[in-house]
Amino acid sequence: MSDPSEDPASTLVQAISACQLCAPDFAATATAHAPRPVVWFRPGARLLIAGQAPGARVHASGRPFTDPSGDRLRDWLGLDEAVFYDRARVAIVPMAFCFPGYDAKGADLPPPARCGATWHARVMAALGPRRLTVLVGGHAHRWHLGRTTCKGGVTATVARWRDFAPDVFPLPHPSWRNTAWLNRNPWFAAELLPELRQRVAEVMRDD
Ligand code: SF4
């Protein structure tokens, strides 16, 4: 039996889990926290959820999307927690693995660009081919689709979802802060979400 520590993906998971590159930056935030990478992927997953960065609740739990954003995202995908957290089928890879902290006004800081630059391409290579990629928020849109494609911003990119389906779906962030956005863009729930749920169900059903 092979030693899992020799598996390149396991080695990468261990390296990210031990990463402290942002420690000085996080120590200087209003939250003054230490890095806690939330790493949740395994090669062979058929669905990739490419997200933004953990929030404070996920920083505490060490498990991705254990917050109201996660509840809304699971509803959008039509997945229960058992499947959502099945790493054999679902990989959850944010643009930053750690909670970036709050600024002095209590607003979320953006994911540190150093995390995406250091790890994201290596994780994508380790994951291998996916059946479906769901891009959550503008940072993931820009990395995976390119800045030129996303130059109109999140609303314009999500509105073009048919250009990327059925293999890629760009979504807004499921944060409560985007509830007004959802109300302003009813086509998202009426048109995109039914197609997304159908596609997720197909991908989860196939062997
Ligand atoms: S955010 Fe990324 S680069 Fe920064 S400490 Fe965490 S894992 Fe390392």
Image (spheres, rainbow, N blue to C red):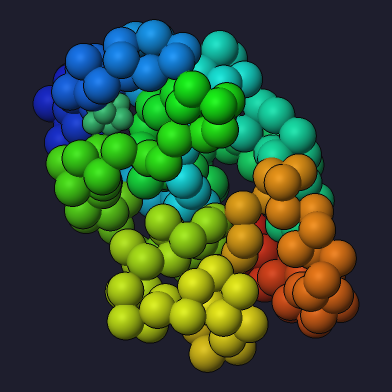
Residue 193 seen in render = yes
Between 135 and 85, the residue placed more toward the observer is: 135
- In the rendered view of the protein, which quadrant contains the N terminus? top left
The quadrant where residue 7 appears: top left
Query: Does the image show residue 4?
Result: no
Direction from residue 127 to residue 110 in the image, left or right? right
Q: Identify the residue shown where x is 32% and y is 63%.
A: 143
Q: Residue furthest bottom?
A: 163
Task: Return the residue nearer the eye: 3 or 36.
Answer: 36
Count of numbered marks: 0
Q: Residue at x 47, y 80 (%)?
A: 152
Q: Residue at x 49, y 22 (%)?
A: 104
**Is residue 38 depicted above or below 178 in this figure?**
above
The relative height of residue 121 versus residue 27 in the rendered view (above or below) is below
Counting from the top left corner in percent of width and height, residue 44 is at 39, 51
Position of residue 123 measured from the top left corner of the image (x, y, whole percent): 26, 46
- Which quadrant of the rendered structure holds the C terminus? bottom right
Rendered view: 112 above or below 61: below
For residue 193, side relative to residue 22 (left or right): right
Residue 134 pos. (x, y %):
54, 62
Figure quadrant, ligand 1: top left
Estimate the x, y position of residue 95 in percent, counting from the top left: 37, 46
Residue 130 in the figure: left or right of residue 62: left
Q: Nearer the viewer, residue 158 or 162?
A: 158
Residue lying at the far front of the rendered structure:
105
Instruction: Residue at 53%, 46% (x, y): give it.
Output: 90
* Viewer-side residue, 101 vs 48: 101
